[in-house]
Image (cartoon, rainbow, N blue to C red):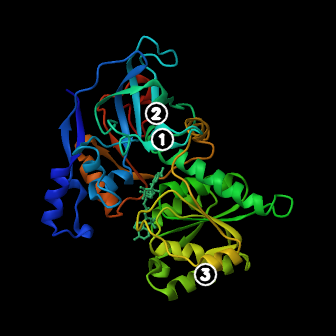
């Protein structure tokens, strides 16, 4: 049986009891545990995968913390997490025509498209019966995978960093940009000021903005991640200078700095995946007619704002979740040309996945965290592994 990580309601309850219900003290590495998995029998449209590498994703922390909802309980007491993976096709069902054994593929996590293609549910999170990919093997439908762009110029870990975060950023950017253009067309203003706060999705969002010629600013507490984005022409703002917006004075000081950086104009489009104190800072930094887009709530799910004030400023707050399957495919075309992710310096071994999740929770990583699942890599990807023959 393939080994796979699981989260159970018992593990969540035991950890909550250990810390006396204080979520800030929860150690997610005690909740995500190595387990085994029985793969379903192969259907005619199924693809059997050997997982090569995965990226650590915050939704797994949200599941282990049970801070948004207790998704493990809602799913019957146990989930197999992991919704961003790179794998090798081992076998295909009789009706599969797009893939064959030996192909290298990436996943998307749109678990159930609505009639317009947007996800009603996310795979390995709230989609019922969805089994995730923090596992040695997986059985997926052929609609869930995309050919990995092995010739895009990125190394294997960089490709593995993108399957979940890149489509999210691709959709956020289109939404933020196009909503802004409803208000102010290109004819009136060509170059925009675009801001993102720390985190992998925001970084990719800013790469899209930069690639289209806009001035992009990355406000983050991580010197390593700021330095990486600076090499791509994305201007750094140190969030620690503003005490991560702990007090109104910090927000005011940030607002003043934004006005200085933009010649008094302020930001036209902002990506805020964090909320909490970051939300107020983002609102203060928006220009008139500005757009604030989000698909995350890492620090808080609730926002308070003055609707009258935002109406007068013609400001739009927009919420998205994840892209359509077409959007996921289109985002993959931008690997290497637009998306050049910062990857955390350590590539974790499969057995260290809980530590990777813990270090993500503690915000200790210098880029997107990657877990190497397969020790033996297929010939097709060996040359893409930095500094080794695989
Ligand atoms: N809807 C979707 O499709 C989707 C997809 C991906 C992620 N998400 C959600 O979006 C959120 C961010 O995910 P991500 O993948 O972009 O981020 P990430 O790569 O996991 O990085 C998280 C970032 O959070 C920042 N951070 C941590 N503690 C902070 C604090 N106290 N104050 C301000 N910033 C803090 C850090 O930025 P610095 O230290 O650099 O400032 C860190 O880089 C999560 O809630 C995740 O679940 C949603």
Disc with the residue nearer the chain's start (1 vs 2): 2
Distance from disc 1 to disc 2, alpha carbons, whole Å, reads 6 Å
Secondary structure under tag 1 reads loop
Secondary structure under tag 3 reads helix
Ligand 1: does it lie within 8 Å of the C-beta at label 1?
Answer: no
In the displayed structure, 69 sits above or below 161; it is: below
Label 2: which residue? Answer: 106
| Residue farthest to the top, as pictured | 94
The answer to which image quadrant residue 284 occupies is bottom right
**Residue at left offset 52%, top offset 63%:** 227
Label 3: which residue? Answer: 255
Q: In which quadrant is the N terminus drawn?
A: top left
Secondary structure under tag 2 reads strand
Task: Classify residue 193 as left or right of residue 133.
Answer: right
Distance from disc 3 to disc 1, alpha carbons, whole Å, reads 34 Å
In the displayed structure, 31 sits above or below 37; it is: below
Q: Where does the image place residue 317, in percent across and percent down from the top left?
A: 60, 65
Pointers 3 and 2 in contact (CB under 8 A)? no
Q: Which mark is residue 39?
A: none
**Residue at left offset 42%, top offset 10%:** 94
Disc with the residue nearer the chain's start (3 vs 1): 1
Label 1: which residue? Answer: 163
Q: How crowded is mark 2: few (under 14 residues within 10 Å), some or many (20 or more)?
A: many
Task: Classify residue 156 as left or right of residue 316.
Answer: left
| Residue farthest to the right, as pictured | 187
Task: Classify residue 350 as left or right of residue 120.
Answer: left
Q: Where does the image place residue 176, in percent across and percent down from the top left?
A: 65, 58
Q: In which quadrant is the C terminus drawn?
A: top left
């Amino acid at each position: 049986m393939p080994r796979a990580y699981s989260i159970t309601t018992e593990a969540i309850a035991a950890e909550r009891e250990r810390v006396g219900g204080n979520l800030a003290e929860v150690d997610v590495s005690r909740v995500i545990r190595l387990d085994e998995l029985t793969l379903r029998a192969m259907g005619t449209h199924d693809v059997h995968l050997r997982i090569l590498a995965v990226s650590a994703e915050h939704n797994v922390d949200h599941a282990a913390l049970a801070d948004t909802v207790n998704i493990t309980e809602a799913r019957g007491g146990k989930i197999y997490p992991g919704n961003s993976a790179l794998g090798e096709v081992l076998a295909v069902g009789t009706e599969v025509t797009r893939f064959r054994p030996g192909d290298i593929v990436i996943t998307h996590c749109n678990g159930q498209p609505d009639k317009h293609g947007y996800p009603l549910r996310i795979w390995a999170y709230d989609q019922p019966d969805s089994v995730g990919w923090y596992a040695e093997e997986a059985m997926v439908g052929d609609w869930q995978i995309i050919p990995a762009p092995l010739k895009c110029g990125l190394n294997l870990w960089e490709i593995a960093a993108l399957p979940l975060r890149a489509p999210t950023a691709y959709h956020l950017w289109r939404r933020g940009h196009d909503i802004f253009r409803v208000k102010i067309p290109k004819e009136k203003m060509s170059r925009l000021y675009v801001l993102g706060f720390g985190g992998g999705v925001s970084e990719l969002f800013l790469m899209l903005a930069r690639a289209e010629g806009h001035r992009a600013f990355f406000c983050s507490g991580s010197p390593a991640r700021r330095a990486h984005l600076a090499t791509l022409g994305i201007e750094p703002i140190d969030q620690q200078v503003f005490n991560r917006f702990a007090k109104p004075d910090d927000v005011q000081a940030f607002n003043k700095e934004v006005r200085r950086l933009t010649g008094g104009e302020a930001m036209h489009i902002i990506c805020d995946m964090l909320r909490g104190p970051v939300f107020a800072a983002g609102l203060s930094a928006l220009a008139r007619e500005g757009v604030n887009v989000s698909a995350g709530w890492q620090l808080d799910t609730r926002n308070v704002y003055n609707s009258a004030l935002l109406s007068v400023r013609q400001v739009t707050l927009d919420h998205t979740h994840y892209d359509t399957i077409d959007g996921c495919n289109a985002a993959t075309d931008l690997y290497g040309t637009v998306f050049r992710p910062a990857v955390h310096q350590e590539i974790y071994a499969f057995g260290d996945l809980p530590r990777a999740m813990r270090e993500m929770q503690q915000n200790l990583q210098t880029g997107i965290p990657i877990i190497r699942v397969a020790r033996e890599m297929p010939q097709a990807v060996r040359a893409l592994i930095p500094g080794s023959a695989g």
